[in-house]
Image (tube, rainbow, N blue to C red):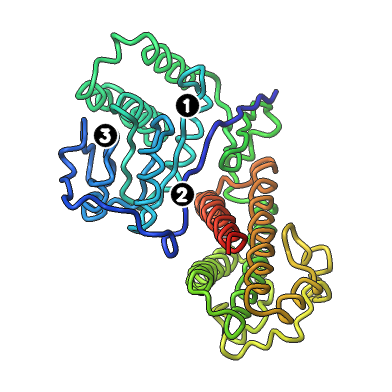
Amino acid sequence: MKRTISFLFAFLTASVFTLPTLAQDSMEAPVDSILNWHPINETLITSGQPGVDHMAALKARGIDTIVSLATPSEANLEEANRASELGMSFVSIPLGDDGPTPDDVDWFNSVMKAQEGKTVLVHCNTNRRGSSFTFLYRVLVEGVDPEEAIKDVEAIFDPSQSETWSNLFDQMLSDTTEAAVIVQPGAPGGEATFIEDASTLALGSKSYTQADVDFMAGMIHHHAQAIEMVDLIEGRTNRRDLIMLGKRIAVSQDSEIKLMVNWLRERGEDVPPIPGDDSSEGEMDHANMDHSNMDHAGMNHDGMDHEMMMMPGMLSPEQMQTLRDSEGDEFYGYWLQFMIQHHEGALTMVDELFKNPGAGQDQDIFHFASEVDIDQRIEILRMREMLGTLNRD
């Protein structure tokens, strides 16, 4: 039997490179002046709503990611913008009208899993939601003793005096005593699947699936085309926001290509040839790459056919030629529209990965796919904003 969980989430953020600078308070406030500031350990902190004047101190404290459970507001949006200016990731998970639900907890847990190795601040308005969701994550995902973890909630408020939170705790913790099941996380913002059928439980013991291999191989070529698009920026526009965005995309996706190549090689899987790659390490030699005659739709490397190359969001040869033939504001507009298309295709690939039984459960795959989902959503929002400035101009 399968049952599904739908997630409620919203994502408020923008690119660190190009957001207009917000007016900042002349005074910066220390982190311990944030309402109910409560460090749990060196890499996990909960608190109430920080102000814009706290953001520089949070950055100095080493915060990499802010996860907000606060009710969306102008203060929340300003926080997201300032976090992006400072180079911190920002994720907003506002609760639905029916209050905290297991759906919300599952989505929160999937976001937190993707932050491994990072220093995270979880906050809401007063730190009731923040401390409570963090408690459930620590118990359900990290395996912390509930009696130990609850102390960090009780430092903020008494959950036993709240019917809302005591009921949620009872519901979520009682689920851990049910018969063994496999919880297959969905794509961020998508659906998770509980697999209880005995015939599929064996999937839980397999570290990765063919769908994982296909995802990594396909994403290598998907990223390669994005880098090719970035290479076309030089000489076709002098708009700094696009130049800086392109550099960010090239650096991040080149690094991710290396990660994907290594993941495949470490498991003895075939590594697809990368356009312009003459190295043994799978790095792309941008300086020596000749993209002018690259026909992505017609490429056929070691059996990689047309269907593989035309993955979701991939640009057609005609679209690539349109970019090569344009310049100035025309190039700027085409490039943003086509890269949005390209990024949305990557989101589709992540979603399709998690729809495959047993796929996306390898730790490296899960974290990589989650990061792709988060990063591409951030950049799509920013590119849409950039298109709006072009229209206003």
Q: Is residue 34 above or below residue 363?
A: above
Q: Position of residue 7 (x, y in %)?
A: 57, 31
Figure quadrant of the C terminus: bottom right
Q: Counting residues from the N terminus, which is met first, the one under dot 2 or under dot 1?
A: 2
- Residue 201 falls in which quadrant of the image? top right
The kind of residue tagged 2 is Thr
Residue for point 56% across, 42% down: 188
Q: Position of residue 104 (x, y in %)?
A: 49, 28
Secondary structure under tag 1 reads loop
Disc 2 + disc 1, Cβ < 8 Å? no
Distance between the Cα atoms at labels 3 and 1? Answer: 17 Å
- Residue 146 falls in which quadrant of the image? top left
Towards the viewer: 241 or 36: 241
Secondary structure under tag 3 reads strand
Q: Which residue is mark 1?
A: 95
Residue for point 67% across, 48% down: 353
Q: Which residue is mark 3?
A: 47
Q: Is residue 117 above or below residue 166?
A: below
Residue positioned most to the bottom: 288
Disc assigned to residue 13 = 2
- Apparent side of residue 156 relative to residue 308 in the rendered image (left or right): left
